[in-house]
Image: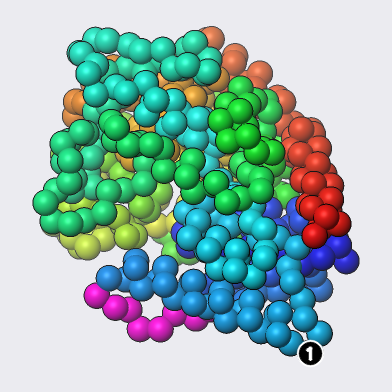
Amino acid sequence: MSGEILVVPKNGQGHLFPCMELCKHLVSRNYKITLVIDSDISSSLPTSLLQSPLFEIANISSSPPRPDPFHHQEQHMLSGLDGLLTRKTESVDPIRPICAIIDHIQFKTQQVFGRFGVPTVTFITSGACWAAMQHAVWKAQPNDMKPGEVRLLSGLPEEMVLKYSDLKQRRHWMGLPPHGAGSDGGGSKRPRGPPFPGEPAGWVSEVERSIAILINTCDDLERSFLDYVANLTGKSVWGVGPLLPDGYWRSADSILRDWEIRPKRDSNYPEDQIIEWLDSKPRGSVFYVSFGSEVGPSMEEYPELANALEESKWPFIWVIQKPSGRPGPPFVGQPGPGSLTSDEGYFPHGLDNRVGKRGLIIHGWAPQLLILSHQSTGGFLSHCGWNSTVEAIGRGVPLLAWPIRGDQYYNAKLVVDHLKVGNVVSEGYPADMVKKDDIVNGIQGVMTDYEIRVQAARLGAKFEDGFPASSVASLDAFRDFINQQNIKN
């Protein structure tokens, strides 16, 4: 065994899934991995991890919630880590982990690790474009930009210009004032995401104490952005992703069964029925729509989306998940027979009857990896969460980008402007409400644009041989770096 590494993820599947895959890569390099969590996630862990003698879970169970649950959870993690490290270092056979890998949102744990002399490595579960552009946008000081203006971002590819419309991110979705308007007067915290004019990008200060940075990406997608982060921080930066399940990389020429690699939740369609429906459609003809459970369109935009899917005439799969911790108002249609309640989300009344077998409307869990890996899938309307983005890119599926918050805007710019494998949902987005005609035109563009489809296929082909070679090399380089650090200490 090469030593013990503590791994501290953030809750939420967008952070947990890549973290688990990182753990698997480190276990395969003979490290003992201790995953430090504050809730029971054992049902989400891959069997290969649970069965490995080099992997264990340190569950810092949460006590009853307090009036400020976020602050309470944060403090609980810090005190729990302190206790865990105390037990390790004061035992009969004391052990000091060789390092701790922490989700960048868990940056406050660095103060605890520092007291015990444990070096930290920051793990960014999003891509490098988000990190680079967040800082570059702040540096450009865009608060004096005028409508129609674009501004070059120093150090980034020339196509990644800042547009005036980029500043109009949907802060009202989070119950917050428009960009640059200050706090809401209620003392609420500003969300993580694009910096306000005059404020430094938060992640830069968060990684100051770390000895290195790991990012969930690879050279083929974001080499120039990895270089920006390395030059900015002066630290070793490695792209070690995309951190997707082993089955994803082994199934480039076959259908990927999600239930074999990810926990299944409630759904109105079993996988076999979804496969049967996809098998009945022509190659590249199905348009897939999914925003996940944490974000989605506004209450007014859901009907526009439903009407667009009805009008577009392309076969489609629309996944509508129950809101889970989603900020902002509930997303509801008018109540009716068989509809979901106001707490459960939007319901497209009568759409399934009107479109017949052309559409498949899934309520709840959907096998996204299966759908994206099927030859009938030809386009993906997505919020551009990083996991969904790289899952689609790796399968050569063009994207229609509809970002809602945070890193999703930068992921969308990467997809549209840099990688050129998709379009944004409407020309005026995000300042304007998305209308039916915007979506219809967007679907048609993604499903028929020759250059986008060729580029998506070309980029997807880079992943046909499996997990990127550059990321394998990066993980090996990280191993050598950590081993060398351990020798010095």
**Left or right: 139 as drawn, with respect to 232:** left
**Circle 1 is placed at which residue position?**
92
| Relative vertical location of residue 455 with respect to residue 79 in this rendering, above or below | above
Q: Residue at x 27, y 48 (%)?
A: 190
The residue under label 1 is which amino acid type? Answer: Val
Horizontal side of residue 270 vs 26, given as left or right: left
Asked if residue 50 can be seen in this view, the reply is no
Q: Residues within 10 Å of mark 1 (few under 14, many from 20)?
A: few
Q: Secondary structure at mark 1?
A: loop
Q: Residue furthest bottom?
A: 92
User: Residue at coordinates 67% horizontally, 33% vertically from top-left?
Assistant: 218
Residue nearest the viewer, comparing 172 with 82: 82
Q: Nearer the viewer, residue 167 or 399?
A: 167
Question: In terms of image quadrants, where is residue 45?
Answer: bottom right
The answer, for residue 163, to whether it is visible in the render is yes
Q: Residue at x 24, y 36 (%)?
A: 170
Q: Quadrant of residue 339?
A: bottom left
Please identify the quadrant where the N terminus is shown.
Answer: bottom right
The image quadrant of residue 83 is bottom right
How many numbered marks appear?
1
**Which corner quadrant holds the C terminus?**
bottom right
Q: Is residue 472 magenta?
A: no
Q: How is the image coloured?
A: rainbow
| Residue 358, x across and y down, in percent | 39, 35
Please give left or right for residue 115 compared with residue 133 in the image: right
Image point (20%, 33%), residue name: 180
**In the image, which residues are magenta?**
60-67
On the image, the x and y values in percent for residue 51 come to 77, 72
Which x, y percent locates residue 107?
Answer: 50, 56
Majority SS type along the magenta span: loop
Q: Is residue 61 magenta?
A: yes
